[in-house]
Amino acid sequence: MTLTKADIVDAVYNNPGHSKAHSEEVVESLLEIMKRTLANGEDVLISGFGKFCVKNKA
């Protein structure tokens, strides 16, 4: 199964008290923080989920 950004937004939206627009804003903010961190050469560790890091390829 492929998990898309839209799937994540829908999952956040399905929690009571969250509008669709707010859910999308939260997901976009999270992804932007992760991209910026990785671009700065730092790793992103989400405990219980995984570690993201940039690897240089030849």
Image (tube, grey):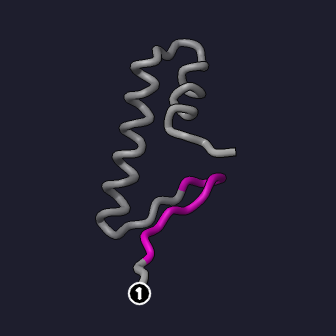
Residue 37 percent location from the top left of the image: 35, 58
What residue is shown at x 55% (from left), y 62% (from top)? Answer: 51
In the figure, residue 11 lies in which quadrant? Answer: top right
The amino acid beneath tag 1 is Ala
Tag count in the figure? 1
Residue 29 percent location from the top left of the image: 36, 38
Q: Is residue 10 left or right of residue 19?
A: right
Q: Which residue in the protein does label 1 denote? A: 58
Q: Which secondary structure dominates the residues rendered in magenta?
A: loop
Residue 25 percent location from the top left of the image: 38, 28
Q: Is residue 37 left or right of residue 23?
A: left
Q: Is residue 55 left or right of residue 41?
A: right
Residue 54 included in the magenta stretch of the image: yes
What residue is shown at x 44% (from left), y 65% (from top)? Answer: 43
Dot 1: element: loop
- Name the residue nearer the viewer: 2 or 43: 2
- Name the residue nearer the viewer: 13 or 45: 13
Q: Which quadrant does the C terminus fall into?
A: bottom left
In the figure, residue 24 lies in which quadrant? Answer: top left
Q: Is residue 3 above or below residue 54?
A: above
Q: Is residue 13 above or below residue 32?
A: above
Residues in magenta? 46-55
Residue 33 percent location from the top left of the image: 35, 48
